[in-house]
Image: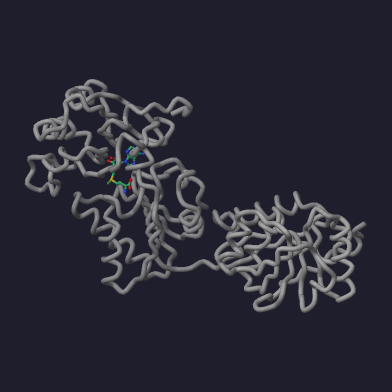
Amino acid sequence: MANPAHPAYPVGLRLAGRRVVVIGGGQVAQRRLPALVAAGADVLLVSPSATPSVDVMAETGEIRWERRRYQDGDLDGAWYALIATRDRAANDAASAEAEARRVWCVRADDADAATAWTPATGRVEGVTVAVLSGNDPRRSAAVRDAVVEGLRDGSLTAARPRVPGVALVGGGPGDPDLITVRGRRLLAEADVVIADRLGPRDLLDELPPHVEVIDAAKIPYGRFMAQEAINNALIEHAKAGKAVVRLKGGDPYVFGRGMEELQALAAEGIACTVVPGISSSISVPSAAGIPVTHRGVAHEFTVVSGHVGPDDPRSLVDWAALAKLTGTIVILMGVDKIGLIAEALVRHGRSADTPVAVVQEGTTATQRRVDATLATVGETVKAQEVRPPAVIVIGDVVRVNAPLTDA
Ligand SMILES: C[S@@+](CC[C@H](N)C(=O)[O-])C[C@H]1O[C@@H](n2cnc3c(N)ncnc32)[C@H](O)[C@@H]1O
């Protein structure tokens, strides 16, 4: 039995170019081999059979595989051994050889008979977390998960130095769970957050009191000037050596003016990290049970800005060409102009019966879906008092049933 008075001595093995022998090609090998390969080990697998993924690793040359049972002498030249067959006698023989040759040896079938234990491991941003807790792998895995998650989402910030600079973070459509892990971590490390009206605003409540939160929607200028004021705020705080997060709804580059902000910063010599986000254009339909593509229904989807109508000379959209496409059309910022847009699509050839769904405040507690057709959507949106933000989906995908979702 493992002696609790003598806990395992943790160590990081540098295995690059060094022989590691793995006996047995089943599930245990499948789980352990990728980390051994990543460590650069010269892996020799000895096993009459292997799982399909282990087989692929041998085919691609990541490991060498000798298709046979273990035999004495297999650990010759090994620095480390992993013994994981279903044959107890073979495991005992291999671990006896390891002991005799003083090769550290992990045994999948008998932790007490092993001379080394594999910790539960995880990697986050260049840090390896390895946890051993005696002979209790579940506890090790639980502690590992807690630490890895804390580092990922930024709740364990002490482990990472705060980095000044600007990050343009796509916050996703609104549900705080739909921001990326990287975005959430940067948010947790920020000194200043400049946030849009859309996106995961609930996350702002979690920020510590010292963080300065600037509401970009309340910057008191006209529409054009507001962007300039946001750019100036980014530049000013970056120059003051702060860690600044510009938190945007969806993805920063989908109708998000992200590149303008990046260019404004670049003009001042300030580098900026861009973190992609889940765009509302696909996630809001999805949250309402609508796939933007579906086999046999739509092979394309087109995301269009509806902030200016089809007859407005400022529109860069070729509405006639759009009407002729057969796939899904997703309109953002289109609530005000949807009547005119629907009319233009029908005028240019789309059937008036084409189904339309308008999804307001998608992924939030107040999400609401209103269904119509191109013929009726203008009136329906008014009658039902649909308000922005909403994503409008046009096409047969709207009628693809999703019986098992609770959207
Ligand atoms: C200025 S655009 C920004 C889009 C954002 N960058 C993205 O990738 O989702 C704002 C429009 O996105 C759509 N939108 C964003 N979040 C939404 C949500 N939670 N529900 C419905 N529509 C949303 C609306 O059409 C809104 O008018």
Farthest-out residue, top = 383
Q: What residue is at 28 percent from the left and 72 percent from the top? A: 268
Q: In terms of image quarters, where does ligand 1 lie?
A: top left
Q: Residue 386 appears in which quarter of the rendering?
A: top left
The percent position of residue 23, horizontal first and vertical second, equals 76, 63
Q: In this view, does 36 lie to the left or right of 74?
A: left
Q: Is residue 382 above or below residue 330?
A: above
Q: Which of 5 and 241 is in front in this view?
A: 5
Q: Quadrant of the C terminus?
A: top left
Q: What residue is at 47 percent from the left and 27 percent from the top? A: 406
Q: Is residue 146 left or right of residue 403?
A: right
Q: Is residue 112 left or right of residue 165?
A: right
The percent position of residue 329, horizontal first and vertical second, equals 24, 39
The percent position of residue 92, horizontal first and vertical second, equals 88, 61
The percent position of residue 24, horizontal first and vertical second, equals 75, 59
Q: Quadrant of the N terminus?
A: bottom right
Q: Nearer the viewer, residue 310 or 329?
A: 329
How has the structure been colored for display? one colour
Q: What residue is at 47 percent from the left and 46 percent from the top? A: 203
